[in-house]
Image: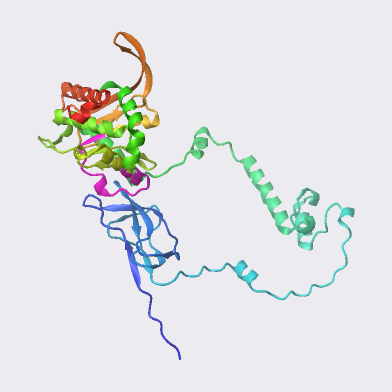
Amino acid sequence: MNTKTSPQAQKDIKVPNMGESITEATIARWLKKQGDDVVIDEPVVELETDKVTLEVGSPITGVLSEILVQQGETVEIGTVIGHVSEGEALPPKEKPQEKAKATPQKEKPQPKTEAAPSSHLLETPPLSPSVRRLVAEGGLDARLIGGQGKGGRLTKGDVLTFLDKNKLEEVEEILPEPSPEERKEARIERVRMSKLRERIAERLKEAQNTAAILTTFNEADMTSVIALRTQLKESFQKRHGVKLGFMSFFIKACIVALKEIPTVNAEIEGNEIIYKNYYDIGVAVGIPQGLVVPVIRDADKKSFAQIEKDVASLSQKARDGKLALQDLQGGTFTISNGGTYGSLMSTPILNPPQSGILGMHKIQERPIAVAGKVEIRPMMYLALSYDHRIIDGKDAVTFLIRVKECIENPERILLDI
């Protein structure tokens, strides 16, 4: 008695809604192949937008039964890009040769032939009729063609390969030498920009086109911060479970300066200046896909330990491609540490619509005049890029001096002076 099986339940994999400003996404890569087992919420595809990279999980436990959109293609929000069916994984299709190996076959009796003369008596093993005809038609010397058959026997494929190679060499002799431009083009690799890289390019160009960017410089003696960090880093890590870095000192120092110079924490909207009485500090993080700036919310209300935990967590999420849109939105001021890559001096560019960005750099020992004497001190150049439309030079210089004072005298940060 035949019974009908009900069709397997099937669920769509859709591009999720990722915020009002995001209308499309690019398939960065499929994490699973068609026919693979998947469990509910297991990441199956990685999407890339102009702001974030997002992993999309399986809607049910089952099999990735169909991939509708391939890697590199761009689709709109809500598009169905694949299907997951309930049930176990489909068995992989056997290749014909594997199937032949799996099925034992009886050996056919081979006709008896006379024993061939010893190979050492001949210059080449005996040729089959078809091989002999090819050699004759091509006017070839069989001894010059390497035989790949059993016992060094020359096969029909060996002769054809030899003929094709000779024809290719003849064609190469006829073709003209490539021009210098053609040689250069052959060594060029063209790769389409990712959505994130396109957005970075747009925002940086937007900053240059809309803001009157100017940069002012100063330098900070890192002796006190280094000494304090060296003294407390072990007990700090033991108590809080995170390393004490330099970033928390600079975030705290910037907040002291931002409270004194509020225009650096402001932005322009139309013909109005918006002053922000909160301090959401962006920390620039370099990843293979580009530069992202996750934001530490209400940094003024957080301890050194909590700031260090936030920096570590957001940096790891950025490297893993797991930053959410809310992690990147709404910063009021940004800090970029080019010193991690060895940069000694740079002019950071604004992160629109913000009006200021602080550039940290490499700590390097230099001779400094201290109380009339020359001493070797660990120094760091600091750079503040700012929008000159709302921040005057005096305010920019004052801001940077306050940051310098807080770093050189860390107790100012603790006392908020």
Residue depicted at 79% across the width and 57% down the height: 151
> Does the magenta run of residues contain 320?
yes
Q: How many marks?
A: 0
Q: Looking at the image, which residue sits at the far top?
A: 372
Q: Which residues are magenta?
A: 313-334
Please identify the quadrant where the N terminus is shown.
bottom left
With respect to residue 140, does 397 lie above or below? above
Please identify the quadrant where the C terminus is shown.
top left
**Residue 131 in sight:** yes
With respect to residue 113, does 55 lie above or below? above
Q: Position of residue 371 (x, y in %)?
A: 29, 10
Residue depicted at 77% across the width and 51% down the height: 139
Quarter holding residue 192: top left
Quarter holding residue 84: bottom left
Residue depicted at 50% across the width and 70% down the height: 91
> Does the magenta run of residues contain 34?
no
Q: Nearer the viewer, residue 165 or 35?
A: 35
